[in-house]
Amino acid sequence: MRICLRSQFDMVENCDIKVENGGYGLTAANNTNRVFAGRIGKPKVATCPNCGEISIYIENTEDIKKA
Ligand SMILES: [Zn+2]
């Protein structure tokens, strides 16, 4: 469970990031020089129902540790 850094409320997790008016999502990568290289996963969003703070995170941190 993620806790809001501003108001210490429980955040709503596992929301997707979508580009408005497009079917595209975002991918986080540690190396953008090569196509498909260094991808570390699909970012998720957690939102705070109290203050509206958003937090972007990667669910599987094992790939980041390996990278
Ligand atoms: Zn908050």
Image (spheres, helix red, strand yellow):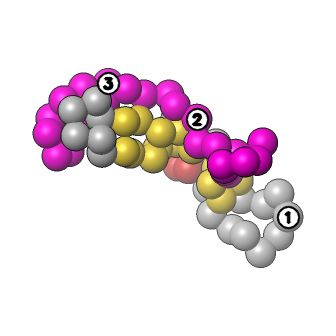
Q: Which residue is mark 3?
A: 1
Q: Give the mark, 3 or 1, whose residue is nearer the N terminus.
A: 3
User: Is label 1 or label 2 in front?
Assistant: 2
Numbered badge on residue 35: 1
Distance from label 3 to label 1 (Cα)? 33 Å
Say whether residue 62 is left or right of residue 24.
left
Q: Quadrant of the C terminus?
A: bottom right
The reply to whether callout 3 and callout 2 are in contact (CB within 8 Å) is: no
Distance from label 1 to label 2 (Cα)? 23 Å
SS for callout 2? strand
Quadrant in the picture for residue 25: top right
SS for callout 3? loop
For the point 24% across and 26% down, the residue is 10
Distance from label 3 to label 2 (Cα)? 16 Å
Numbered badge on residue 16: 2
SS for callout 1? loop
| x, y percent for residue 27 | 67, 51
Q: Is residue 34 visible?
A: yes
The reply to whether callout 3 and callout 1 are in contact (CB within 8 Å) is: no
| x, y percent for residue 29 | 65, 59
Q: Is residue 61 visible?
A: no
Q: Is mark 3 within 8 Å of ligand 1?
A: no
Q: Nearer the viewer, residue 36 or 11?
A: 11
| x, y percent for residue 59 | 52, 35
| x, y percent for residue 31 | 69, 68
Question: Which region shows up in magenta?
Answer: 1-27
